[in-house]
């Protein structure tokens, strides 16, 4: 059982290179489940403008000296070390009221998100300071003036103002993309659970992996910090809509066009498909998911299911099934093995949730739970912020406002009946923009209609059915590779989404100029930029290979015999290669044509070096296009140019992307693609 005899820890902030305690009297933070004072918090007297300046000058400058991969590697090392020492975070997390199972998405989920970002960044981004984006655009007929988008790190600070419900994940999912982008962070956790964030930040800083100034922490209020934000800073906010709107319209944020991302109240819906009646696997999955989302973290999740939309015919069955599950939910101390649901974060929050339930209940009836009487399996409801799950039913969901507008941030949801898919879509939209909704159906038509109907109002939609019952990550879990955020009431923000999340902290600029100058900016070869031809580039290891190293091959003629042989050898006897009359009747061809893959194969035959050498393997092609037909008698030539070099950390090789351009005897481009190879860092290979 919980150790309630410990002394309260006075939290500190880490700003301008040192841990600092706030001045004056600190505010006590109560343990969610026991009511004892767990920590003391104050940021009074800190120099907030100085912290921003320190981050920009010290942290930003140091981070920008590293490449995208180097920064990602720092996060990998931090993530691995945090994972190894996570037990103390779980112990500290009990004070937030969360059971260990509830803490998993916060702690393991947060560290896992950081590791995913670190891994994806090294797989998907170049090992460079500048991130090119999209194709090179031809801006002149002769190719002498081209354009491309590039991204570079903002030169300010990312200020992350987080909610109380995910003290670890909320920080890590935001600092990971910002730090990979090269932007230092100032984290301001919600006061109520800041002790857990503070502990994690202490461990991160003790590792001394991040450069000084890359990560700062404010425990307590942010004082006048927002008065000092500039157009190079970014502010992300998670919390109540009321605070979010206040911060979004802060004069400095508005005047300086500060990037502001907000994630706020969201009345997320779970929709039971009309096909998913009692007795179907989807019905059971739906009930299980709604009950789980209501009770996980005591319903204190921005993605939790608040609105339960069900076909009118199944409303009674859904309520009965939910009631049976919710009534069985043991509420108690978070470290009690019997407990299925822990405490809300504070007694104040519990009163807030009770007040919201009363507001919703003015337009709905409570069908399960008693908000003002708490039944516990352990703990003391007078001291701990416990509350049993409360299910409401709204009989008139199209005229009622409260169930669609009031977020009771606890184990609370409202069941509403619909008649037909159109009505379900209309009800979901009454939430005026949500982070996520889920649709439980095994009917492809229902899935397609529902998603098309509600997608514009949602950042994420999860489709649940029998086939993904075991593998589904569930309604409530935001995932690092997918976007998290929602329009309208949900705040209008977008986070994560893989490398999209990194770009939120970078500036996209359109660069125009000659290919030579553009290549110098991006570090990648573009057609028209200078190239050098000395020894065959496949004979060069990464130690010698340079961007722009090029080979122009001999020519090879394509004969009818080649095409016949290739067709019968591969089995690809498509008529355009085999049947003259049929080929001529085809609007694209004047005669029989060579196979596209034969062209690519001949191209490889022209440019590879047969002997063992530094090119270790070919692992694919990108952007392959066959641009003009190749007829018998045409002769092919290849121009292969080293376009991008990405050394891999911890291995003996790197990845090299080659621009491959195949032309015919008239200098027409017949095929264009990128060849992807793995090339040894040195040759011969060393151990
Ligand atoms: P708040 O909006 O009060 O706080 C969110 C964050 O903003 C906290 O870090 C808070 O710090 C900070 N903050 C508050 N006022 C200011 C200010 N003037 N300037 C700068 N920062 C400020 O939300 P809570 O976390 O207290 O939760 C209240 C309600 O918000 C919940 O009951 C729930 O309804 C909703 N909520 C919604 C979430 C969602 O994602 N949908 C997530 C969490 C909450 P401090 O704690 O120090 O005040």
Image: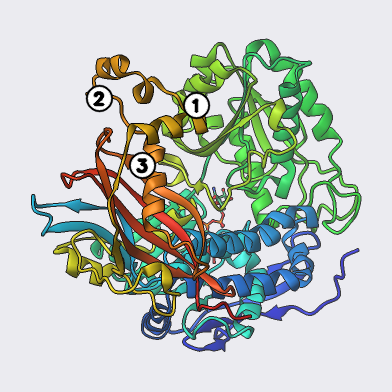
The residue pinned by badge 1 equals 451
Q: Are marks 1 and 2 in contact (CB under 8 Å)?
A: no
Rounded to the nearest whole Å, what is the CA distance between mark 2 and mark 3? 16 Å
> Residue at left 65%, top 20%?
442
Q: Which mark is residue 589?
A: 2
Rounded to the nearest whole Å, what is the CA distance between mark 1 and mark 3? 42 Å
Q: Nearer the viewer, residue 365 or 284?
A: 284
User: Which quadrant does the N terminus fall into?
Assistant: bottom right
> Residue at left 44%, top 68%?
646
Query: Where residue 501 appears, x then y in whole percent?
Result: 45, 56
Q: Is 133 drawn above or below residue 436 in the view shown?
A: below
Compared across the picture, whether 2 is left or right of 642 comes to: right
Q: Is 211 drawn above or below residue 156 in the view shown?
A: below
User: Which quadrant does the C terminus fall into?
Assistant: bottom right
Compared across the picture, whether 377 is left or right of 262 comes to: right
Q: Are marks 2 and 3 in contact (CB under 8 Å)?
A: no
Q: Secondary structure at mark 1?
A: helix
How many C-alpha atoms fall within 10 Å of the one at disc 3: few (<14), some, or many (≥20)? some
Query: Where residue 312 appears, x then y in whole percent?
Result: 64, 12
Sequence-earlier tag: 2 or 3: 2
Q: Nearer the viewer, mark 1 or mark 3?
A: 3
The residue pinned by badge 3 equals 599
Q: Is 666 drawn above or below residue 521 in the view shown?
A: above
């Amino acid at each position: 059982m919980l150790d309630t005899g410990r002394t309260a820890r006075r939290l500190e902030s880490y700003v301008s290179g040192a841990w600092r305690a706030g001045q004056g009297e600190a505010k006590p933070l109560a343990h969610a489940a026991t009511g004892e004072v767990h920590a003391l918090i104050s940021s009074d007297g800190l120099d907030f403008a100085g912290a921003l300046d320190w981050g920009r000058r010290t942290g930003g400058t140091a981070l920008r000296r590293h490449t995208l991969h180097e920064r990602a590697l720092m996060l990998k090392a931090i993530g691995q070390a945090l994972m190894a020492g996570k037990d103390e975070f779980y112990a500290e997390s009990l004070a937030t009221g969360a059971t260990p199972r509830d803490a998993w998405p916060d702690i393991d989920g947060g560290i896992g998100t950081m590791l995913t970002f670190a891994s994806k960044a090294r797989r998907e981004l170049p090992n460079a300071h500048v991130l090119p984006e999209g194709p090179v655009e031809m801006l002149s007929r002769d190719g002498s003036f081209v354009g491309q988008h590039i991204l570079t790190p903002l030169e300010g600070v990312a200020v992350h103002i987080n909610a109380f419900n995910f003290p670890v994940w909320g920080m890590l999912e935001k600092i990971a993309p910002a730090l990979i982008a090269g932007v230092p962070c100032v984290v301001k956790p919600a006061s109520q659970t800041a002790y857990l964030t503070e502990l994690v930040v202490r461990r991160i800083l003790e590792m001394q992996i991040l450069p000084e100034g890359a990560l700062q922490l404010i425990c307590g209020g942010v004082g006048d910090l927002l008065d000092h934000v500039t157009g190079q800073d970014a502010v992300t906010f998670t919390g109540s809509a009321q605070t979010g709107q206040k911060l979004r319209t802060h004069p400095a944020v508005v005047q300086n066009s500060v990037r502001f991302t907000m994630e706020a109240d969201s009345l997320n819906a779970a929709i039971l498909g009309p096909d998913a009646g009692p007795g179907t696997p989807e019905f059971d999955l739906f009930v299980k998911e709604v009950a789980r989302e209501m009770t996980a973290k005591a319903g204190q999740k921005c993605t939790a299911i608040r609105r339960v939309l069900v076909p009118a015919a199944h409303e009674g069955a859904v309520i009965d099934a939910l009631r049976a599950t919710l009534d069985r939910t043991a509420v108690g101390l978070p470290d009690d093995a019997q407990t299925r649901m822990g405490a809300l974060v504070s007694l104040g929050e519990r009163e807030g949730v009770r007040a919201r339930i009363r507001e919703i209940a003015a337009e709905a009836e409570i069908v399960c739970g008693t908000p003002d009487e708490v039944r516990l399996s352990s703990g003391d409801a007078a001291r701990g912020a416990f509350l049993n799950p409360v299910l409401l039913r709204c009989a008139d969901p199209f005229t009622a406002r409260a169930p669609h507008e009031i977020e009771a941030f606890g184990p609370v949801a409202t069941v509403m009946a619909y008649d037909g898919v159109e009505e379900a879509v209309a009800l979901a939209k009454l939430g005026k923009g949500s982070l996520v909704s889920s649709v439980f159906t095994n009917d492809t038509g229902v899935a397609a209609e529902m998603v098309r109907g509600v997608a514009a109002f949602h950042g994420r939609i999860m489709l649940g059915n029998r086939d993904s019952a075991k593998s589904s990550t569930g309604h409530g879990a935001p995932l690092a590779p997918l976007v998290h955020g929602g329009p309208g009431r949900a705040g209008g923000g977008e986070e994560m989404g893989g490398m999209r999340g990194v770009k939120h902290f970078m500036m996209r600029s359109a660069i125009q100029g000659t290919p030579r100058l553009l290549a110098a900016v991006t570090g990648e070869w573009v057609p028209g930029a200078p190239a050098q031809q000395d020894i065959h580039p496949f004979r060069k290891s990464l130690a010698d290979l340079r961007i722009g190293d090029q080979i122009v091959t001999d020519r090879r003629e394509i004969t009818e015999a080649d095409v016949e042989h290739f067709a019968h050898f591969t089995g690809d006897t498509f008529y355009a290669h085999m049947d003259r009359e049929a080929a001529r009747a085809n609007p694209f061809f004047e005669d029989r044509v060579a196979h596209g893959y034969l062209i690519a194969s001949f191209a490889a035959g022209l440019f590879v070096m047969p002997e063992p050498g530094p090119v270790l393997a070919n692992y694919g092609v990108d952007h392959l296009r066959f641009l003009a037909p190749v007829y018998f008698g045409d002769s092919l030539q290849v121009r292969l140019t080293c376009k991008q070099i990405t050394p891999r950390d911890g291995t003996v090789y790197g990845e090299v992307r080659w621009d491959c351009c195949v032309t015919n005897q008239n200098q027409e481009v017949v095929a264009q693609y990128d060849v992807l190879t793995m090339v040894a860092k040195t040759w011969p290979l060393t151990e």
